Image: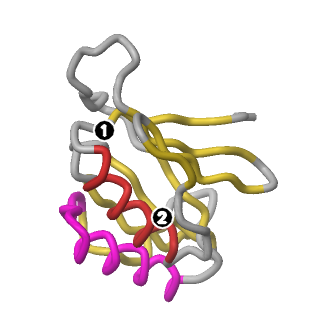
Amino acid sequence: MFTHVFLGAQDLEASRKFYDAALGALGHAPGAGAGSRYVYRTPTGTFGITTPINGEPASFGNGSTFGFAAKSPAEVDAFHAAGVANGGVTCEDPPGLRTNPAFSYYIAYLRDPSGNKICAMCRS
């Protein structure tokens, strides 16, 4: 459905360090780029962090969450641990199994260094 998603970053290098670690725990290569943005490419799409093009401060969307696919609960836990160790802040409930009428899933939520809410999830 999506070709790319970009999130604004207040401190691009702090965000790059965070995403290199958190997405690295999910098996992704470090971000490529420099200057005003870094991108993380996969065969199915692109995720990026950027300083806003309009020169205004970056801000997060209230009520927005961006989710990354994980292959296992262990990968979700590694994502969460790497994120917290690199400037992220845990949010929501602790990492763990959630259920709803449609399916069960293992998920962990973080706030990145700019306050964007992200998660890693694998479906069981």
SS category of the residue bearing label 2? strand
User: What residue do we see at 30% from left, 38% from top?
Assistant: 9
SS category of the residue bearing label 1? loop
99 and 26: which one is in front?
26
The answer to which of marks 2 and 1 sits earlier in the sequence is: 1
User: Badge 1: how crowded within 10 Å, few (<14), some, or many (20+)?
Assistant: many
Do the CB atoms of the residues marked 2 and 1 lie less than 8 Å apart? no
The amino acid type found where label 2 is placed reads Ala
User: What residue do we see at 38% from left, 77% from top?
Assistant: 96
**Residue highlighted by disc 1:** 9
In the image, the segment drawn in magenta is 73-92
**Residue 35: assigned label:** none
Q: Position of residue 89 (x, y in %)?
A: 18, 62
Looking at the image, how many numbered discs can be counted on the residues? 2
In the rendered structure, the answer to whether residue 78 lies left or right of residue 44 reads: left
Q: Is residue 103 above or below residue 118?
A: below
Coloration of the structure image? secondary structure
Furthest residue in direction bottom, as rendered: 74
Q: Is residue 94 above or below residue 59?
A: below
User: Badge 2: how crowded within 10 Å, few (<14), some, or many (20+)?
Assistant: many
The amino acid type found where label 1 is placed reads Ala
Q: Is residue 87 above or below residue 67?
A: below
Q: Position of residue 66 (x, y in %)?
A: 46, 45
Please tell me whether residue 84 belongs to the stretch shown in magenta.
Answer: yes
